[in-house]
Amino acid sequence: MGIEEQREEREVLDSIFPDEITDISENEYRVSVPLDVTNDDGDDSEPPTLILQVQYPSNYPDEAPRLDISAPPNAPKYKYLDVQSDKLTLLESLNPTIEENLGMAMVFTLVSTLKDAAELLISERQLAAQAKRDFEAAKAEEEENRKFHGTAVTRETFVEWREKFRKEMAEEEQKRMDEKEAEDKKKRVKEEKRMTGRELWEGGLAGRGEEEDEGADGLESMEKIKIEA
């Protein structure tokens, strides 16, 4: 009786999925399951497709079919679904449907359940990603607004600001005094070096004062000699 039911189900599936079903053997086939999803704004990638592989055990449908899930060959990676990582989750989502339909043809129901579970998984991830983007945008806007509105002043923040301001003013005054002192020192050194000994010698000024003093002393000595005489 199991084999007959398997054949009947297979004929029904051919009429429902004429382009989506592919035979592997007499009791095994694949069903292509395209997903209906709404991409993010600006995302023009193709919606993903799942491949449900079904193998009948000899006493199906009294026994659960053997199932596997894969992606089509060379399928592009989809942002919110990774068949390799999500396979176990998707297969587990089919267990309640299998238990409820033991003894009856169930593959069509399994295909519908898989489609719904995968689309729900994608939708949840899209909503989570959008929530994260909204949070980051709100946070950035809050930071931008804070630049214009400033921080609320409390006694603690005012005291902190006052101490910081006084310190900055003291450092600025010390810097100004140090610069003035350095400038005055430069002026003094420049004035002291204005006429060096070499410059005086080259200008004929070196020794003139001494000669004049010696000449004056000589005249005074001669005057004294004359008077004493």
Image (cartoon, rainbow, N blue to C red):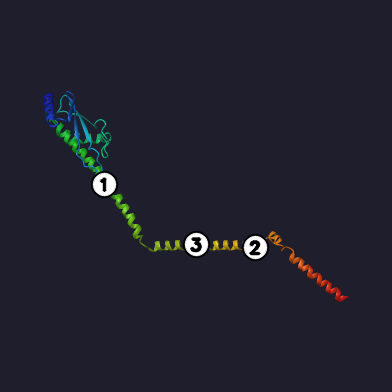
Of callouts 1 and 2, the N-terminal one: 1
The image quadrant that residue 89 belongs to is top left
Residue 151 versus residue 160: which sits nearer the camera? 151
Q: Position of residue 187 (x, y in %)?
A: 60, 63
Q: Which residue, given by chain and number where applicable, does mark 3 sit on? A: 172
Query: Which element type, helix, strand or loop, lies under badge 1?
Result: helix
Q: Marks 1/2: CA distance? A: 77 Å
Residue 24 is tagged as none
Residue 103, can we see it?
A: no
Residue 93 versus residue 118: which sits nearer the camera? 118
- At label 1, the amino acid type is Gln
- Between marks 2 and 3 in the image, the one whose residue lies nearer the viewer: 2
Q: Marks 3/1: CA distance? A: 50 Å
Of callouts 2 and 3, the N-terminal one: 3
> Within 10 angstroms of label 1, few (less than 14), some, or many (20 or more) residues?
few
- Between marks 1 and 2 in the image, the one whose residue lies nearer the viewer: 2
- At label 2, the amino acid type is Glu
Q: Position of residue 95 (x, y in %)?
A: 19, 34
- Indicate left or right for 151 with 83 as reference: right
Residue most extreme to the right: 229
- At label 3, the amino acid type is Glu
Q: Which residue, given by chain and number where applicable, does mark 2 sit on? A: 192
Residue 202, can we see it?
A: yes
Q: Marks 2/3: CA distance? A: 31 Å
Split into 4 quadrants, where in the image is the N terminus? top left
- Please give the name of the residue rendered at 29% of the width and 48% of the height, measured from the top-left corner: 133
- Indicate left or right for 154 with 122 as reference: right
- Indicate left or right for 205 with 21 as reference: right
Q: Which residue, given by chain and number where applicable, does mark 1 sit on? A: 130
Q: Position of residue 229 (x, y in %)?
A: 88, 75
